Amino acid sequence: MRALVFHPTVPRYLATRALGFAWEAAYWSGLSPLRLREVSDPPLPGPEWVRVRVRMGGICGSDLHLVTLQTSPSASAFASFPFVPGHENVGQVVETGSAVADLAVGQRVVVEPVLPCRARGLFPPCPPCQEGDYHLCVRTTDGHLSPGLMVGACRDTGGSWGETFVAHRSQVVPLPPTVSDENALMSEPAACALHALMRWPPRDGDTVVVVGGGIIGQAVVACLRAMGCSSRVVVLAKYPYQAEQARALGADHTVQLQGADGHYEALADLVGARVRKPILGKRVLVGGAPMVVDCVGSGRSLDDSLRLAGPKGTVVVLGLASLPRGVDWTPVWLKELRVVGSYAYAVERWRGQPVRTLELVVRWMAEGKLDLSGLVTHRFPVDRYREALRAALGKSTTRAFKVAFEFQ
């Protein structure tokens, strides 16, 4: 099968990283750890596994960090190389193991990519898995699979940047016919957003500031409204087209990023704060929002998020922060902020019942409560991956939200 393969040997990693500072195309050049190859389809690891033929595979922000070598080196301890990237997916079952009775060949599905104890054949499961927090599994390097937090970072499973990959039955969510491929592709990032909101729900009437107008920021806005949340939602977006989309999904106000802190005045007015100027550096806010959701994870976005939160406020770090620079942590102690991280999805409680985050998202999509299909803006065959990566990285000119590989 055709697949993009990521294999960061030390020479390739160092050469690409050095060239990438001045030449973006280095990240997909002949020196890059990312290559398009013909590889064998991954075998089913056991009787409870299925093979999925990819219809679309999304390019996530974390994938871009991977390709541009910005992921923290510590993450390599939880991966096995070489692997086929891609965890956002929608596909079709083309093979089932002998112990799979509730899935049929030809069935359209999405796959929850995390690889916890159950997928690894580990019993009894670790404490987080027992509690339903399988996204926090502490045994993602154990069992009969190679190390890997999820599909798209494990050499044994493949990923959605290839024509097929394999998944354990417990990961597979069947798709109702009313959910389009485009909407289904968005179910994984939507589940990431929803998990954060269900673990730290805003109070009705509070103001929620969403930092970032990309896919995750848009999903946060849409999920807040799908939950029936009446909070006032303010989105800080980098580009005008992102602000426009956020309003269409239910944001009450949008503010565009301006310089180092040019957006603070508008945000202060919206959250009832005052702006003060220190001797040196960015301005600070006296007061702020009860809840800020950082959907970027950069040094700048984290610094803004801490400054924009009000006394005893909550800052949810939903963007994949790794090695941020230039973050002033003064607001954490000065305002007694609660800073919490959010990763992936799990078993949630919705209206008193346990439900997996991804299953709830798909249910809402089937019911018409959540439609993110319009965010799939660019599609490419996998052999045009260089164009796809340029589109995903060049949002200022391409106006891209979700860029996807499409397989026939």
Image: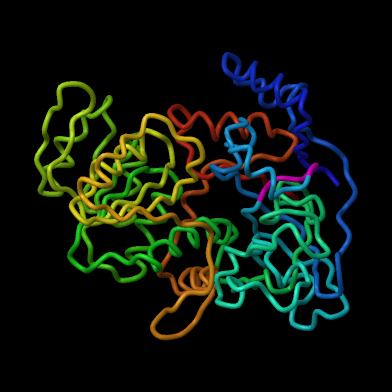
- Colour mode of the rendering: rainbow
Residue 227, percent across and down? 35, 70
State the residue at coordinates (39%, 68%).
Answer: 198
Observer-nearest residue: 315 or 278?
Answer: 278
Q: Residue farthest to the top?
A: 22
In front: 165, or 6? 6
Q: Examine the rendered structure and indicate whether residue 184 appears above or below residue 407.
A: below
Q: Magenta part of the protein: which range?
A: 81-86
21 falls in the magenta region: no
Residue that lies at the very extreme toward the front in this rendered image: 333
Q: Main secondary structure of the magenta part?
A: loop
In this rendering, would 114 be left or right of 96? left
Please tell me whether residue 120 is drawn above or below residue 373 in the rendered image: below
Q: Number of labelled discs?
A: 0
Residue displayed at 79% across by 65% down: 143
Provide residue 325's location: percent of width, then percent of height.
42, 30
Q: Quadrant of residue 211?
A: top left
